[in-house]
Amino acid sequence: MNRLKISIYYLQELNYRLAYAILGTFFLFSITYTYKQGLIFIFLPKGLSHFVSTGLTEIFFTYLQLCTIFSFSFGFGIALTQLYLFLRPGLYAFEAKTIFNLLITAIIFYICLYIFLFPIITKVLWELFSDYSQNFTAIDLTFEPRLQDYLSHLQQLSKILTLSFPCLIALNIVQRYTNRKTWVKYRGIAYITAFSISAFITPPDVLSQTLIGLPLIIVYEIQLKIWALYEGYKKKLLIRQPIESHKYPYRDKK
């Protein structure tokens, strides 16, 4: 009977925390939908004053898609926080500390990523690709950006940046149980895995899969290069470290 009461208590607590996450997501959705035009204005490239819409319901569903992405992204963070608070009493001290540090690191990482890095990447990509349409003088070519296409490109870029943190965590976990030679030996399998992940989360076209898979491969190579530099630095540090004779008293006796 006591086990049944405890199970009911935990189920009630889980329902409460799930309700907090759902209510928080709907609250964020209502806020983002209220300020949807200002939200789009934040992501507008410099010098662009208008977008083109070709469908009757395109603007409505574009607003809806943008607000849904934002609310579910923040709601996922709320759900993870509530899940940690639910599991915290049953965890060991080192497990709770590790998960807490990981959660705080992820929150700080994504905040810095989307506040500082995301606008810079968006600006650079816009200036890079918009120059082709402005400099194309062989025929009369007018560039009229569509709102839905622009937000779709931003969504693909957001997927790339969002996957960067889990990939770094997964690579660091694998790094503890393997060596660098194994990474070099099975580099081809890592490439195939990266494109398999990109094929799973993107539409079935080569460009989208390349935009997701190539950054994963770049992250893998950067991690491998940092590992090699760290091992070289560690070897030089061991070579330069002097050997103290008082640590080995048995050598003096011989």
Image (spheres, grey):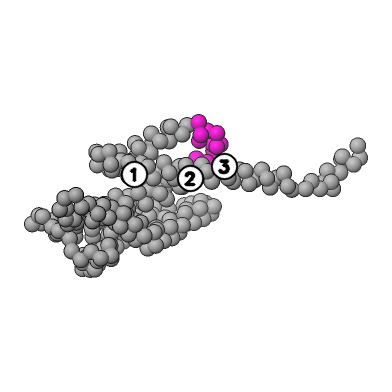
Q: Is residue 184 magenta?
A: yes
Give the CA separation, mark 3 to mark 2: 10 Å
Local crowd size for mark 2, using a 10 Å CA cut-off: few (<14), some (14–19), many (≥20): few
When the figure is inspected, residue 203 is found, relative to residue 181, above or below; the finding is below
When the figure is inspected, residue 10 is found, relative to residue 248, above or below; the finding is below
Q: Which mark is residue 228?
A: 3
Q: Type of residue at label 3?
A: Ala
Residue 191 visible somewhere in the drawing: yes
Give the CA separation, mark 1 to mark 2: 16 Å
Q: Which residues are magenta?
A: 174-185
According to the image, label 2 marks what residue? 222
Q: Type of residue at label 1?
A: Ile
Label located before the other in sequence (3 or 2): 2
Q: For the view shown, which residue lies furthest in the right direction?
A: 253
Q: Is residue 110 left or right of residue 129?
A: right
Asked whether disc 1 touches disc 3, contact meaning CB atoms under 8 Å apart, the reply is: no
What kind of element bears circle 3?
helix
Local crowd size for mark 3, using a 10 Å CA cut-off: few (<14), some (14–19), many (≥20): few
Residue 91 locus on image (x, y percent): 48, 51
Please give the name of the residue rendered at 74% of the width and 48% of the height, measured from the top-left corner: 241
Please give the name of the residue rendered at 43% of the width and 53% of the height, measured from the top-left corner: 87
Please give the name of the residue rendered at 20% of the width and 66% of the height, measured from the top-left corner: 49
